[in-house]
Each structure stands twice: as structure tokens, then as C-alpha cells.
């Protein structure tokens, strides 16, 4: 290689533009070097399509004119011999371009209109694959390309491959930065949700202490921690996994060893990890919200005068889809009207939770499932008698069933809050009493005693 070509190539190789990640700047530098070194006025960078069925102009310098992403494209079906030459992954040296077997297919459509007599195409390679070519086009009298010139253009093509790697690294870095920002934003968002939930928990906990209706605050906090630790543990583990994945990809990037396949797998893993974090933090927030409901004694409805039987019938109608799905015959026994001054929303919640509790716990071994609700007035009080024909409540757990988070169905998704909510609504909101009937041989049986204030 002559000294002048070597010096030009050295200047290009040492330029910071090659490794800055700006392909347009790097391409312009390389094509300018080719034009100067070969003493031509026309050169371009052409890139193959993914399916290698077409090659299109990425950048073209023609004298003082420079075009980016030109509309010039050559299709394999129109120029099969030229593409066959490209498939060999070697330089195309056409001293007489208009007659050479590799290039004469576009003699009339391209070579003659642009006055091109000789062509030198050097393959651009990246990670072992051919991406395209640097095309050097001589106008005027035909010329014979020397070995030094062929080596010079091939080296420039390899340098462009280096610039492609830099551009990909720059793109990966930007994507990694964006993913990192999104991950931090998601974690901060969920942390804020959790902090709000914990504030609600502290507020509810204070109410439970004031009410002095539950004997063991330690058991309550332990139950809450047990329920919340599972989704939080999964979320923390997933967040740690995402962080490790990010560190590994960053290390691969720094080592210039990050492949497209590894990066695509990283994106999939991060997406799965964020979904797992989102789902489990949402589950934890829901648990805290339900816990808040279990401790709150003032729900969002006003005290009013209403007919109790009609209120319960309306509640049962709203539950019909759930009852039908579980094949349960639920009946409010007939009787006289009972007018009461109380909170209809709280009573609806009590009936709903009692029925839901029966569905989850009572009927595992019962085919003819029945629930009966009976109302009666007695000495200025209203007695609501609720029974099901399920398995009943075992003696050893009767003292615990109203405690928050106590459940015998944790494996099937039970949270242990249903009867705790019932207890708080009856005793705190409605100033009443709930009693577990002694005889549980025919199924679970509760009596809810409410003051009848007209």
C-alpha cells in the first residue's frame, strides 16, 4: 500500500468519529477518504436488507453533493449475477464495469447514465456477517484497480464495520439507560404505594388499639406481616434479579461482548421481572386495603330508617350470580316487616361476608348446599340467625375465627379478614353482638343481635 493511502487510512482509523456512535459522521469521513485516496468523485455506502434480497444506498457522495438514505435500491431478482458476486463475500473488482459479468446487468440503468466506467465494491462486515458494501465508482476512462487500492477500500469497509459496532453500543447504552430509569421509576412508584399502605396500616392499627375489642395486638401484627411478607419477598427477589440482570448486561456492554440475542433475552427477563414486581406489590397493597377495612368502624354510608328484610333481600339478589356459580340455595325465611334505624351498607357487608365465608369453608364435602337467614324481634332487639348446612366450626378454632388473618384456607387464597370485618361491623359500627351457636353439628350457625332504635 502506498504511503499516501496508508496515511489516509491511519488518519481515518485514529479519528474519534469512528467510535462516537454517529454512523452518518463516520460514513462521511470514510467515503471522503475513499474519494481522496482513489482520486474519484463518486462513492457510496450500500446496505443489504435483512433477507439479502435488496441492497440500498445508505449514503452517497457525488462531487459536492452528499445524500443520506437515498432512494436507490437494487433488487436481487433484477440483478441476480451481481448478487451472486456479493454472496461470495469478497470484493467486486470491475475494471470495465460496463462489460464485467458482475456489474453489466445495470449498464443501461445505472452505469451509462452516471458515466461510470470502473467499480470497486468492498464488503462491510460486522460480527462475521456481511452488512453491505463500500462502492467506489470511477468516471471517465476505464482504470485498473491496483492491489493496494483494493486493500485500501477493504480496510475502509472494515473501519465502517467498527463504526457500526460503536453505533450499536451507543444504542444499547441509551436503551439500558432508559430501562434503568423505568426500573427506578417503577420501584419508586411501588415504594410510594407501599408507604401509603403502611400509613393506612398504622392508622387502622391505632383504631384497633382504641377499640380494645381484640385481645392480642401481637397476633394481629404477626398475621399482617405473614400475609404481606410473601408478595413483598417475591417483589424484592424479582427486583434483585432485575438488578443483577442489568449489571450483567452492563458488564457485557463494557466488555464489548453484548450480542443482540443476549440483549433481547435481557429485555424479556426485565419485562417478566417488572410484571412480577407489579403484581405482587399490587397484591400487598390490596391486603393492606382489606386490613384497613377490617379495622375501620365508620363506613361511607349514613344512619337511616329502613326495613331490614327488604335490605337483606336486595343484598341476596346482588349475590345471586355468586350463589348460582357455587350451586347454593340461600333463603331468607318469611316473617313480619322489621323497621330499624341503622346502617344498611354495614348490614349488607355483614351478609356478604358471612355468605362468602360459607362458600370458602363450609361446603367442601356437601352436595346439597343450603344457607338460611331468619329475622325476629325480641325485647327491643333484632336477632339475625344465620346458618349453613356445611361442616360447621371446630371447637378448637372457635375462639380465633374473629381474629384478623386467622384462616384455615390459606392455601386456597383465604386472607382471614372476612369474619374479622363482620365482627368489627357488628360490634363497633352497629353497637351489637355476634355469637357462635353452641351446636355446630348441622353446620355453621351465628346469631347477630342488633339494637332496634326506631
Image: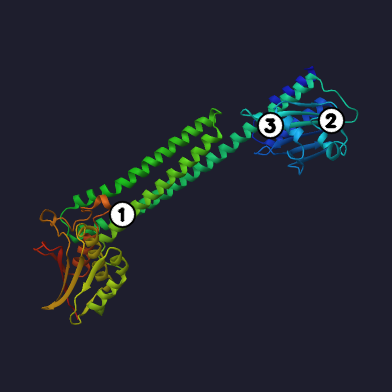
| Residue at figure coordinates x 69%, y 25% from the top left | 13
Q: Residue 315, percent across and down?
A: 28, 72
Q: Is residue 59 left or right of residue 261?
A: right
Task: Say which residue appears at 72% left-offset and 24% top-offset.
Answer: 155
Secondary structure beneath disc 1? helix
Q: Is residue 45 above or below residue 210?
A: above
Q: Image check: 375 left or right of 325?
A: left
Q: Nearer the viewer, mark 2 or mark 3?
A: 2
On the image, numbered disc 2 is attached to which residue?
Answer: 97
Identify the residue under disc 1: 287
Helix, strand, or loop for circle 3? Answer: helix
- Say whether residue 358 is left or right of residue 60: left
Work out whether 430 lies above or below 17.
below
* In the displayed structure image, the side of residue 391 where residue 32 appears, left or right: right
Q: Could you give the CA–CA distance between mark 2 and mark 3, rounded to whole angstroms? A: 32 Å
- The local secondary structure at tag 2 comes to loop
- Residue 345 occupies quadrant: bottom left
In which quadrant of the rendered view does residue 427 lie? bottom left
Q: Nearer the viewer, residue 112 or 45?
A: 112
Query: How far, Cα to Cα, is label 2 from label 1?
Result: 76 Å
Q: Nearer the viewer, residue 359 or 415?
A: 359
Residue 126, percent from left and from top = 64, 30
Label 1: few (<14), some (14–19) or many (≥20) C-alpha neighbours in 10 Å: some
Residue corresponding to mark 3? 17
Vertical position of residue 235 compared to residue 131: above or below: below
Check the picture and name the quadrant holding the N terminus: top right
Q: Position of residue 112 (x, y in %)?
A: 88, 37
Amino acid at each position: 500500500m502506498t504511503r499516501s493511502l496508508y496515511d489516509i487510512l491511519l488518519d481515518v482509523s485514529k479519528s474519534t468519529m469512528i467510535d462516537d456512535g454517529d454512523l452518518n459522521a463516520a460514513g462521511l469521513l470514510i467515503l471522503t477518504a475513499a474519494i481522496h485516496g482513489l482520486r474519484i468523485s463518486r462513492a457510496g455506502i450500500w446496505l443489504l436488507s435483512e433477507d439479502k434480497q435488496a441492497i440500498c444506498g445508505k449514503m452517497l457522495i457525488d462531487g459536492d453533493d452528499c445524500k443520506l438514505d437515498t432512494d436507490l435500491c437494487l433488487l436481487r431478482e433484477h440483478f441476480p449475477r451481481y448478487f451472486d458476486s456479493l454472496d461470495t463475500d469478497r470484493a467486486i473488482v470491475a475494471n470495465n464495469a460496463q462489460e464485467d459479468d458482475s456489474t453489466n446487468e445495470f449498464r443501461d440503468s445505472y452505469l451509462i447514465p452516471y458515466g461510470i466506467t470502473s467499480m470497486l465494491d468492498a464488503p462491510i462486515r460486522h460480527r462475521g456477517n456481511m452488512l453491505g458494501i463500500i462502492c467506489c465508482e470511477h468516471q471517465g476512462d476505464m482504470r485498473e484497480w491496483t492491489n493496494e487500492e483494493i486493500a485500501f477500500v477493504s480496510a475502509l469497509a472494515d473501519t465502517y464495520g467498527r463504526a457500526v459496532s460503536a453505533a450499536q453500543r451507543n444504542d444499547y447504552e441509551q436503551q439500558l439507560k432508559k430501562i434503568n430509569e423505568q426500573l427506578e421509576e417503577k420501584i419508586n412508584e411501588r415504594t410510594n404505594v407501599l408507604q401509603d399502605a403502611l400509613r393506612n396500616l398504622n392508622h387502622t392499627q391505632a383504631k384497633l388499639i382504641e377499640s380494645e375489642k381484640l385481645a392480642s395486638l401481637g397476633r394481629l401484627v404477626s398475621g399482617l406481616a405473614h400475609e404481606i411478607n410473601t408478595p413483598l419477598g417475591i417483589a424484592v427477589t424479582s427486583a434483585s434479579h432485575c438488578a443483577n440482570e442489568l449489571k450483567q448486561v452492563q458488564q457485557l456492554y463494557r466488555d464489548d461482548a453484548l450480542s443482540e440475542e443476549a440483549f433481547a433475552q435481557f429485555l424479556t427477563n426485565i419485562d417478566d421481572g417488572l410484571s412480577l414486581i407489579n403484581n405482587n406489590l399490587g397484591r400487598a397493597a390490596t391486603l393492606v386495603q382489606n386490613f384497613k377495612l377490617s379495622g375501620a368502624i365508620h363506613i361511607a354510608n349514613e344512619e337511616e330508617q329502613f326495613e331490614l328484610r327488604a335490605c337483606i333481600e336486595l343484598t341476596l339478589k346482588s349475590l345471586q350470580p355468586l350463589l348460582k356459580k357455587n350451586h347454593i340455595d340461600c333463603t331468607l325465611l318469611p316473617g313480619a316487616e322489621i323497621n330499624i334505624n341503622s346502617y344498611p351498607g354495614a348490614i349488607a357487608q355483614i351478609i356478604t361476608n358471612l355468605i362468602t365465608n360459607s362458600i370458602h369453608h363450609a361446603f367442601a364435602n356437601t352436595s346439597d348446599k343450603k344457607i338460611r337467614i331468619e329475622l325476629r324481634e325480641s325485647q327491643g332487639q333484632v336477632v339475625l340467625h344465620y346458618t349453613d348446612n356445611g361442616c360447621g366450626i371446630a371447637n378448637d378454632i372457635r375462639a380465633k375465627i374473629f381474629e384478623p388473618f386467622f384462616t384455615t384456607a390459606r392455601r386456597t387464597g383465604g386472607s382471614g379478614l372476612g369474619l374479622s370485618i363482620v365482627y368489627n361491623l357488628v360490634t363497633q359500627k352497629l353497637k351489637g353482638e355476634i355469637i357462635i351457636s353452641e351446636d355446630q353439628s348441622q353446620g355453621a350457625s351465628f346469631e347477630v343481635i342488633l339494637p332496634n332504635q326506631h
